Image (tube, rainbow, N blue to C red):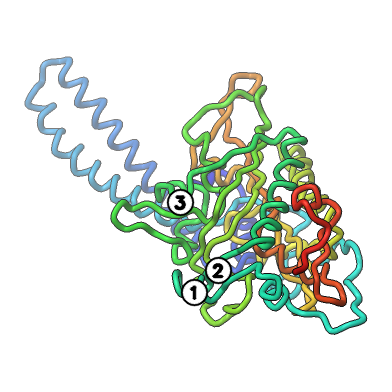
Amino acid sequence: MIDLNKVRENVDGYKKICSAKNIEIDVDSILSKDEQRRKLQKEIDDLKFQQKKFGEEKKYEEAKALKSEIQAKDSEYQELVKELNLALLKMPNTGLHPNVPIWKDETENVVSEVHWEPTKFDFEPLDHISLMKKHDMVDIDRGVKLGWSRSYFLKWDGMLLEQAVLQYTLKKLVKKWFIPMNVPNIVNPECLQWTGYFPWWEEDAYRMARDNQWLIWTSEIPVTAYHMNEILEESELPKKYCGYSACFRREAGTYWKDTAWLYRVHQFNKVEQVIILPADEEMSDKYYFEILHNSMEVLDDLKLHYRVLQLCSWDMAIWKYNSQDLECWMPSRNSYWETHSVTAFLDFQARRLNLRYRDGEWKIKYCFTMNNTAIATPRVLISLIENYQDKNWNIVVPDALRDYMWKDIINN
């Protein structure tokens, strides 16, 4: 869980973080409960010490008399710990990066960079669904027939284009010494809880009730949990991974949005960057921008118009220390839409995962973690397909992907 000692050192500062993230947490009550827990723990320890002393002095009746008192206090202690842990699960990160604007409206996120120019058409462009249907790249009707709303088949060049984008990105990261991982799509609930997704996002995940296991939202979950309950050596950090997986979301609360598009779907594919590093904020900033620029490089290689958005505090989830989105231009919507997200957590996830390392002085510390979408499909295909259509409504294959597609243009 979060470091309550750090909260105690600056209670007002932590309350400001909660307020900046629009999170209602009774910080004083939680600190009071933790104080009760520590007091009760000392009482139990003192009674056990006295019980042991009676045993050594062969005062067995006195030792036996203490047993019921210890059990009663231990029962009280366990109930208190249970209440406290539930509260701790909902507490936000103890840190907030200096670059994060303290605003309470997501419309006030800050555009920090803009790359390339919007495509200018001298004809009436089609949306991605119309283009894909024209070239037999997608079948939504049969997808819905088999899997209800937001289900789809990618076919022929639709499937090949998706794989081209994924494989191009994966190869780029492997060349940068990221370890590729094909991860489990089914995990235990603890993985989602300890990486920070539960209890806040439980409604948006798919549960398999018979086994109480869950489909992953992103490969970030199993990759970040890969070293849980381990003590790493500082000399082996940072660890850089790129997880490849199918991802699953219920899209709860968006039932009437984008149902005819490929923007909000229940199943998609993604290559995710994850870095585990020492507890060093300067190093965290360094690698944060490294993984951000890796994703930007992919979009630059594809020559897609996009912008970088620094998220304000109101638009950042509880676990985030710093976060930026990449938003690609989608002509059919005449606007930017999120395709990537980068997040630094400091030790928020590592504390929940019990993910630690031994530093050069043999001190045990919690790691820092971070992640970023390297590429996610089919979302990025919307921008790619719409921006690369020609006047005959064929789709030009970007130069970067031609070796993966075995063609220069998608036409019939």
Give neighbour class at mark 3: few <14, some 14-19, many 20+ (Cα, 10 Å). some
Q: Name the residue under label 3.
A: 193
39 versus 334 height, above or below: above
Give neighbour class at mark 1: few <14, some 14-19, many 20+ (Cα, 10 Å). some
Q: Which amino acid does label 2 sit on?
A: Tyr
How far apart in space, not on screen, are marks 2 and 3 (Cα)? 30 Å
At horizontal 58% and vertical 28% (from top left) the residue drawn is 357
At horizontal 90% and vertical 63% (from top left) the residue drawn is 116
Quadrant occupied by the C terminus:
bottom right
User: Image check: 402 left or right of 30?
Assistant: right
Which comes sooner in the sequence, label 3 or label 1? Answer: 1
Q: Are the two marked residues, 2 and 3, in contact with CB atoms closer than 8 angstroms?
A: no
At horizontal 60% and vertical 55% (from top left) the residue drawn is 269
Q: Is mark 1 on a helix, strand or loop?
A: helix
Q: Which amino acid does label 1 sit on?
A: Val
The residue furthest front is 412
How many numbered circles does the render carry?
A: 3
180 versus 359 height, above or below: below
Q: Name the residue under label 2.
A: 152
Q: Are the two marked residues, 1 and 2, in contact with CB atoms closer than 8 angstroms?
A: yes
> Residue 120 appears at what percent x and percent y?
91, 76
Give neighbour class at mark 2: few <14, some 14-19, many 20+ (Cα, 10 Å). many
Checking the image for residue 144, the label placed there is 1
Q: Nearer the viewer, mark 2 or mark 3?
A: 2
User: Image check: 146 left or right of 332?
Assistant: left
